Image (cartoon, rainbow, N blue to C red):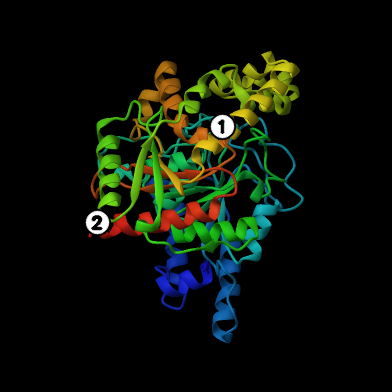
């Protein structure tokens, strides 16, 4: 028997307001204040629109006074990555080269669905230029500092990218959730580095029309939230579908922990948090098998010439770069130009290789409810070190993208949820599987989230 999210919300209650998900006016004003004036959000937003948020909030308040049914998001503040079209606003994808383009004539599908669900859109968030980095550095608008690590040490650390400002908007309390994109981890990386939840659904389930593409093959429209339950709700809105949750206990689940690639290079903090979480889940009854996934070791060779992101971004940018390459972040331009060297034959071969790889991966994953891995193998490095040194930047970028990008190549789905102890640097646990296993992955993640919370006390 399955349980939809309406039943889950009724059973679990809401942390936002006793009457349901609708926030109080005080909470909405506090979010706006954090977005406008908080030091944590100095570089998080490229534009704020409190007038629109206030208008939506007023509409929700009017419904509350009449006792009318509330829409699913009911005035909750949601930030929008500067990748998505919002009617009347310029979509620049964190760049300067598109800053003078015409404003969007209409909302993209994802934004239209958020509005229809009653979300209060609080502003456009900063990002890695054209979404081409897992680090989150932006030379045009400044780099938003990690809001979670600021509470642990005084070193400004990377937020993770490319949904950098979106992650900070949620971690700082300026937004209840952040609309973003995930091509190789761009939702899950900032979630992992800032102690948040990031859900990358199967790409075909959410429309990307009206968003500037990085890779038409891999791009996914999805969101960062504070909890798995909220991730379910946002997915229902963005995908316009109902999520069926079986509500199975951990003891009924069969999970796997791949030992190939994904456990390599973990720093001490990530290793301790991940191993402790796995131990907690086993104590709580979960069956977790260590398995080899040798196909994961093929990813590096598959991506050696830049992969889909390089080829498909080059197709989109080649005319713009012919006249304006000097306005690009040099690190982004370099990665885009890798696609210039890929032939049509190479591109067709890559699609064929991927199809074969997915088939072999799915054969191995069959029989397991989900895989468990660290989302990324390192905690957030200092911003200054990566701004100053190309080698340090690309080394960190490669480590951050390695694990989550495997799920994109699989055409799969994944949740990153926090698994670190209180007071420690944020660490993400990635729960993942193959295409269209979204409801199972969300169901498993709810059970894991509850077990980890119980252990934390």
Disc ID at residue 32: none
Q: Nearer the viewer, residue 92 or 282?
A: 282
SS of the residue under disc 1: helix
Q: Residue at x 68, y 45 (%)?
A: 208
User: Left of 9 or right of it: where is 378?
Assistant: left
User: Left of 435 or right of it: where is 88?
Assistant: right
Q: Which of 301 and 423 is in front in this view?
A: 301
Rendering coords of residue 156 (x, y %): 33, 35
- Callout 2 crowding tier (Cα within 10 Å): few <14, some 14–19, many ≥20: few
Rendering coords of residue 376 (x, y %): 39, 35
Inspect this view and state whether residue 288 appears. Answer: yes
Marks 1 and 2 close (CB-CB < 8 Å):
no
Identify the residue under disc 2.
Answer: 455
Q: Residue at x 67, y 35 (%)?
A: 217
Disc ID at residue 360: 1
Rendering coords of residue 435 (x, y %): 59, 44
Within the image, what quadrant is residue 112 found in?
bottom right
Inspect this view and state whether residue 44 appears. Answer: no
Q: Residue at x 40, y 49 (%)?
A: 254
User: Left of 296 or right of it: where is 88?
Assistant: right
Q: In this picture, is 376 found above or below 342?
A: below
Q: Which tag, 1 or 2, sits closer to the chain's start?
A: 1
- Between the C-alphas of marks 1 and 2, the distance is 36 Å
């Amino acid at each position: 028997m399955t349980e939809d999210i309406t039943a889950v919300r009724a059973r679990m209650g809401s942390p936002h307001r006793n009457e349901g998900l609708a926030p109080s006016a005080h909470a909405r004003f506090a979010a706006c204040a954090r977005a406008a004036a908080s030091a944590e959000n100095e570089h998080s937003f490229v534009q704020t629109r409190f007038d629109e948020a206030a208008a939506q909030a007023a509409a929700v308040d009017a419904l509350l006074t009449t006792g009318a049914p509330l829409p699913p998001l009911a005035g909750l503040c949601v930030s929008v990555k500067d990748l998505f079209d919002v009617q009347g606003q310029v979509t620049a994808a964190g760049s300067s080269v598109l800053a003078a383009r015409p404003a969007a004539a209409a909302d993209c599908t994802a934004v239209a669905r958020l509005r229809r669900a009653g979300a209060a859109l609080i502003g456009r968030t900063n990002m890695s230029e054209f979404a081409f980095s897992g680090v989150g550095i932006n030379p045009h608008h400044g780099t938003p500092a990690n809001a979670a690590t600021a509470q642990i040490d005084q070193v400004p650390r990377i937020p993770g990218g490319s949904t950098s400002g979106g992650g900070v908007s949620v971690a700082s309390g300026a937004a209840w959730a952040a609309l973003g994109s995930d091509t190789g981890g761009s939702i899950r990386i900032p979630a992992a580095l800032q102690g948040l939840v990031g859900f990358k659904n199967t790409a075909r389930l959410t429309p990307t029309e009206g968003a500037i593409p990085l890779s038409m093959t891999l791009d996914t429209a999805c969101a960062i939230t504070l909890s798995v339950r909220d991730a379910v709700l946002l997915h229902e809105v963005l995908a316009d579908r109902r999520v069926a949750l079986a509500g199975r206990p951990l003891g009924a689940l069969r999970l796997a922990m791949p030992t190939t690639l994904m456990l390599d290079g973990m720093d001490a903090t990530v290793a301790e948090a991940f191993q402790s979480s796995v131990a907690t889940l086993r104590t709580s009854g979960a069956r977790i098998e260590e398995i080899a996934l040798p196909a994961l070791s093929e990813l590096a060779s598959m991506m050696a010439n830049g992969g889909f992101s390089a080829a498909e971004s080059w197709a989109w940018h080649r005319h713009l770069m012919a006249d304006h390459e000097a306005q690009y972040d040099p690190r982004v331009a370099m990665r885009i130009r890798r696609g210039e060297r890929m032939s049509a034959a190479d591109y067709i071969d890559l699609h064929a290789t991927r199809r074969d790889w997915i088939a072999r991966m799915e054969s191995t994953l069959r029989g397991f409810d989900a895989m468990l891995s660290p989302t990324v193998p390192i905690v957030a490095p200092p911003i200054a070190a990566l701004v100053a040194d190309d080698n340090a930047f690309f080394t960190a970028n490669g480590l951050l993208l390695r694990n989550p990008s495997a799920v994109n190549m699989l055409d799969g789905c994944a949740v990153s949820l926090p698994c670190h102890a209180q007071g420690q640097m944020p660490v993400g646990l990635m729960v993942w599987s193959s295409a269209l296993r979204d409801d199972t992955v969300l169901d498993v993640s709810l059970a894991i989230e509850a077990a980890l919370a119980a252990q934390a006390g």
